[in-house]
Amino acid sequence: MNIEALQTRHPSSGEDAAPRVVSCRKFYDRESLMAYDPESEDWQKQLARRYDTHFEIAQVLNNVEDVPMSTYETFDMKVTPYLAQLMDRDDPNCPIRLQYLPSMKESLSVRMEHTLADELGEAEHTVPGTSVVHRYPRRVLFLVTTQCASFCRYCTRSRIVSHSGERAIGRADLDASMAYIAGNKEIEDVLLSGGDPLVFTDRKLDELLGRIRSEAPHVRFLRIGSRLPVQLPTRITPELCAVIEKHDVQMVNIHINHSKEITPLLRSRIRMLRRTGTMLGNQSVLLKGINDDVQVLRDLFMDCVSMGVRPYYLYQNDQTLQGAHFTVPLSRMLELYEGVRGWISGPAVPTFVIDGLGGLGKMPVIPTYVEEREGHIECRNYKQERVRMDYLRDGAKI
Ligand SMILES: *Cc1c(COP(=O)(O)O)cnc(C)c1O
Ligand code: SF4
């Protein structure tokens, strides 16, 4: 493909210049990428402008790592122009570039013994014939689509979101899933995920949420997990907010990993979303080289609360086929917790979790602050100051 030939030709500036015509759907030169206003068009149009390979994005960024095409057999690439604008032009270690651009490390990860396509054993816990993962009592994860706006290289569901055409979740799956949820009165919490549920049109989302509310009135808590607001903030529109409000979606969890992703555009759309009255949470993944740093996490979590978004979980990176190189050791995860808890506002501190291999589920990772040792209750605070509180022992006279 000759990319040069696809580039938009701009008339030289002048009063008689013809109106600018966008003759291609993607931006293959830096100037037109940076001149693009993501608010100038419908969010769905922007999806057509996504970059699909590192060759394409190398037209607008420098120092893009060359990877073999076989990389895309494991996991496709997709990057919205909005995200491409946020990427540092030159620095390959830009936290946004690292999240979205493929790397040679992925080929090594694929060959490692302990990496798995379905590390969380989700296929095993999926109710047959549906796209519902029922792992925990009284709540289900409902995968409603395999589509995403952009692909995160560490994605724990890379096995379904990539090559999504082949693995699509269709109407029959949604119907069977609805029947399962409607028929199981003990399900009181439904979490829509995917893929990304917000790739649905407002109409389709309205219909699906409406079905859950009408066919499964026993569901008390309805939540949506989506990264679209961060990958394309213009997805949050008054129409979407009306749908969320109409069906009383009680919680929307977004997914920000680094403060660099928090732009004025995201802030303004989050403000719009907050007005629906839904709770807003953030789920991050702890990623080596991206956010495995005390100051980066403090900034991220405080920036979230400053937008009215409560940090909910910080996940250990899963040993996915392609993304094992992002994993941070447990000891470092504990150190990072110590660097956060007590040092920033309490509501800004998420629960640090490891999702267990093969479907064991989420387990909190918290350093020990209070412990019983040699018959004493030994306590220490975030600054390592210590005190004994023996009146908390079993059988102590209070
Ligand atoms: C994370 C998850 C949930 C929701 O867990 P909470 O701790 O309630 O947020 C539900 N089902 C599955 C399979 C999950 O992985
Ligand atoms: S948005 Fe979520 S499901 Fe989609 S690629 Fe990223 S991590 Fe995976």
Image (spheres, helix red, strand yellow):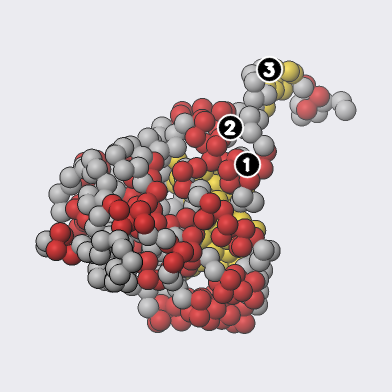
| Disc nearer the start of the sequence (2/1) | 2
Where's the N terminus, which quadrant?
Answer: bottom left
Residue placed most toward the observer, 238 or 111? 238
Q: Secondary structure at mark 3?
A: loop
Where's the C terminus, which quadrant?
Answer: top right
- The disc at residue 385 is 3
Whether the residues at callouts 2 and 1 have beta carbons within 8 Å, the answer is yes
At x 37% / y 71%, what residue is drawn? 45
User: Height in image: 208 above or below 126?
Assistant: below
Q: Residues within 10 Å of mark 3 (few under 14, many from 20)?
A: few
| Relative horizontal placement of residue 57, taking residue 259 as reference (left or right) | left
Residue placed most toward the observer, 97 or 174? 97
Residue 117 in the image: state x and y as whole percent.
30, 54
- The disc at residue 2 is none
| Disc nearer the start of the sequence (3/2) | 2
Q: Residues within 10 Å of mark 2 (few under 14, many from 20)?
A: many
Residue placed most toward the observer, 9 or 189? 9
Residue placed most toward the observer, 232 or 122? 232
Residue beneath disc 2:
340
Toward which corner of the image does residue 270 lie, by quadrant?
bottom right
What is the three-letter code of the residue carrying label 3?
Answer: Glu
User: Height in image: 108 above or below 217?
Assistant: above
User: Height in image: 58 above or below 38?
Assistant: above
Residue beneath disc 1:
348
Toward which corner of the image does residue 89 lie, by quadrant?
top left
Q: Give how far apart the Cα atoms at labels 2 and 1 are.
A: 9 Å
> Can residue 225 be seen at all in this image of the molecule?
yes
Judged by depth in the image, the label closer to the viewer, 3 or 1, is 1
Q: Secondary structure at mark 2?
A: helix
Toward which corner of the image does residue 160 lie, by quadrant?
bottom left
